[in-house]
Amino acid sequence: MERILVIGANGQIGSELVDALAAKHGAENVIAADIGPRSLYGAKMYEVIDVLNAERLIAIAEQYQITQVYQLAALLSATAEQAPLKAWTLNMDGLLNILELARLRGEVSKPLKVFWPSSIAAFGPNTPSQDTPQFTVMDPSTIYGISKLAGERLCEYYFKKYGIDVRSIRYPGIISYKSPPGGGTTDYAIAIFYAALRGESYPCFLEAETTLPMIYMPDAIRATILLMDAPADKLSIRSSYNVAGLSFNPQELALVIKQNLPGFDIHYVPDSRQAIAASWPQSMDDTIARNDWGWKAEIDLQYLVIDMLRNLKISQPSQIGLTIAA
Ligand SMILES: NC(=O)c1ccc[n+]([C@@H]2O[C@H](COP(=O)([O-])OP(=O)(O)OC[C@H]3O[C@@H](n4cnc5c(N)ncnc54)[C@H](O)[C@@H]3O)[C@@H](O)[C@H]2O)c1
């Protein structure tokens, strides 16, 4: 039986991952944790935890007899650029605390299995941008990307040196409707839907032809659980796996939205996030993830757009100016 701790559980990914893990392992076996008060649905158990507090992590792991940790707490790309030192401390020390926790638990019981997400931000301007290979030039130019690349090296180090079963995915930009995004460069691909449903022209902070790798949340959650379920001896990558979802630019996304909402309009006011996006890959080669643990994305752009529009109307009516009938 697994006992799972999800740190950063109130965030965009955590809030959906907790539900998926609860459905799979039983809600009584999933402990959601975040630095702030509970803002969650699926979890039966909730703890306020600062991932930078190593002693509290050790106490919680003992209290709940934790066997797996998903470490999702981080400052994302755009937010991190506003506070680079804070981002470095949270992103690096948060991961190190979890890797150390995994190692120390191994001295008293079983070592913990760890999931930690990297990002396409770990690549940089000299990385081949089309079908970016698993192994290639990595010269990230944001503090977020630098922390992700360093984190990947730490994951592999802890695996090789201490045998920690740590697993990781280089997530593309994740699109979802249940909770707001956390300050990333791909957030435009979510904000655009709110504007479309409000009948507003969307002021896009990226240029029209800025293609980026993206993934719809159900595919991202499926990839995460698939990787965590894979037999350890099948995994050839202990830094972080390339995973492809779909790739598109703002203009292409706007076109599909327009097919569903003909009055929709977009205009372009690129800001500092444009330079970040320009340094990232446009599409990913995920052959190794496919071969090692059977990954294959299922969701295309047409489905994503229709599903986002339908679900945002239901789940976020106040955000898009709809009133709910009492
Ligand atoms: N969302 C994406 O598109 C995307 C893409 C690539 C990688 N990732 C990675 O996935 C992870 C989760 O991303 P997200 O989009 O859910 O982020 P998010 O910003 O939505 O959520 C992060 C959560 O961490 C919590 N947190 C912050 N500081 C904490 C601390 N000291 N202790 C405990 N919790 C703390 C926040 O309260 C928040 O709920 C991050 O590592 C991020 O880099 C996300």
Image: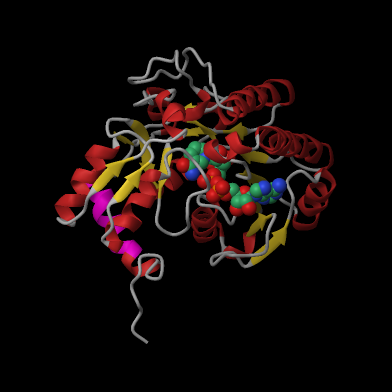
Please give the range of residues in magenta. 302-312
- The x, y position of residue 271, in whole percent, is 43, 35
Vertical comparison of 150 with 82: above or below = above
Residue nearer the viewer, 89 or 63: 89
Q: Does the magenta portion include 304? A: yes
Quarter of the image where ligand 1 sits: top right
Vertical comparison of 204 with 197: above or below = above
Image point (73%, 46%), residue name: 51
Work out which residue is located at the far bottom of the displayed protein and give it: 326
Residue nearer the viewer, 240 or 53: 53
Image point (68%, 59%), residue name: 36
Q: Main secondary structure of the magenta part?
A: helix
Q: Does the magenta portion include 78? A: no
| Residue 269 occupies quadrant | top left
Number of numbered tags placed on the structure image: 0
- The x, y position of residue 157, in whole percent, is 68, 21
- Mark yes or no: residue 228 visible: no
Quadrant for the C terminus in the image:
bottom left
Residue nearer the viewer, 125 or 101: 125
- The x, y position of residue 275, in whole percent, is 44, 27
Residue nearer the viewer, 309 or 143: 143
Q: Is residue 192 left or right of residue 24?
A: left
Image point (60%, 44%), residue name: 72
- The x, y position of residue 29, in whole percent, is 63, 59
Q: Is residue 102 left or right of residue 319?
A: right
- Mark yes or no: residue 278 visible: yes
Vertical comparison of 89 with 179: above or below = above
